[in-house]
Image (cartoon, rainbow, N blue to C red):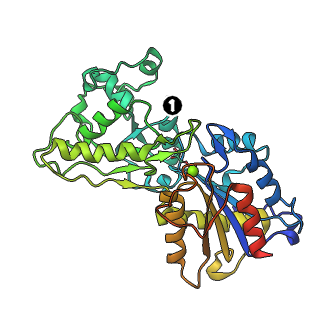
Amino acid sequence: PFTPMVDPDCDNVAGNFAFAFDIDGVLVRGGKPIPEAIEAMKVLNGENEYGIKVPYIFLTNGGGKFESERCADLSRQLDMTVSEGQFICGHTPMRELSSRYRDCSVLVVGGEGETCRLVAESYGFHDVITPGDILKVNASTAPFRRLTPAEHAASRDLLFSRRHCRPEVRKLSDIVISAVFVFADSRDWASDLQIILDIAQSRGGRLETRSETFDEGPPIYFSHSDVVWSAAHEHVRLGMGALRKMVETVFEETTGGKKLVTHAFGKPQVGTFEFAERLLRQWRAEKHGLGLGTLHGRSQGPKTVYFVGDTPESDIKGTNAMDEKSGREGTEWYSILVKTGVYQEGTEPRYRPKKLVGNVLDAVHHGIRREM
Ligand code: G3P
Ligand code: MG
């Protein structure tokens, strides 16, 4: 049931505009807050010359944890409370695919330990298999990978049927993978690459088989396509998009030139920004009591959303595309690029933002000044 948590200070909330933030390279870098980020949040929470509160949400391509854990991390880093109702990570939209694969086996790749399996199960996927499960049954799948004792213990026994709760003489080739989901960054690129390629080249997703035509593998979804991202190192680090390119390139190389089409969620996909706009409408209504009960029973959105990001290829490309799609009648999506992450000062960004600023605090001041 809808329980509005209307802000008691409702009159002092900006109804016309809102902010959405990328996280890595904008608010946080290598697990530590970017100094101006804490101040920027205070400004949005009302510590500004107008005394207004501005609604905001977070939209990161990162993942590998439950949304609630990511919110707890961010709350600690930014010294404030971040709610799940204002947070989207790379794999959040994958939740919507769980009903399609409810009764199927899916492979979930990436992240620390068993966390991504648990996240996928919480989304409604019922039979979640990981690369570790496959390696446990057949270690020769990846000749140079040895599961640690802890990984071995945590991996599922695939030859045991959970459905019937009793051991079955089952071979890996009895298992059909209906889709592959890369939830978070791989912790062992070589074995994950091998296992994803094996499934892409299988007969209809059946483990340990080889297709003759190489065109019958299941769909492969990545939670985003960032080739690089901004972490603790002074130079950008390789991200999930690099693994995606490796999967596609090596597939072509090992199949005599067949093309593999994979799918990506996250930014810059317009669908992800649409998902974010829906969340923002809901958050404005629930938290601030804004735009309630208007058009077709749907809460109304703000006139402008300022999106603050550090990666031209995902943040700026996606924001500009969303703005174009919204057209004149819809919400304006206004892209702001900062210099604290992937984008390097003095270079020409591949996708031009509406505004280039130094850091997230400058971005917040720019948006507020433009509105007031
Ligand atoms: O793995 C995370 C990274 O690719 C980007 O995160 O917050 O910059 O969208 P973010
Ligand atoms: Mg970023």
Say which element carries label 1.
loop
Question: Looking at this view, is 105 or 8 the one in front?
Answer: 8
Residue at screen point 53% across, 63% down: 316
273 or 162, nearer to the observer: 273
Which residue corresponds to the image point at 52% horizontal and 67% vertical from the top-left?
A: 352
Q: Which residue is drawn at 53% across and 50% down?
A: 61
Task: Determine which quarter of the picture holds residue 57.
Answer: bottom right
Q: Identity of the amino acid at label 1?
A: Glu
Which residue is at a point 67% across and 77% down the rendered structure image?
Answer: 303
Left or right? Give the position of 137 relative to 102: left
Give the residue number, with chain letter if any, for mark 1. Answer: 112
Tell me the quadrant of the picture where the N terminus can be found: bottom right
Residue 305 appears at what percent x and percent y?
65, 69
Q: Report how many numbered discs are placed on residues in the image.
A: 1
Quarter of the figure that contains the C terminus: bottom right
Residue 221 drawn above or below residue 237: below
Q: In this view, does 88 lie to the left or right of 171?
A: right
Graded by Cα atoms within 10 Å as few (under 14), some (14 to 19) or many (20 or more), the crowding at tag 1 reads few
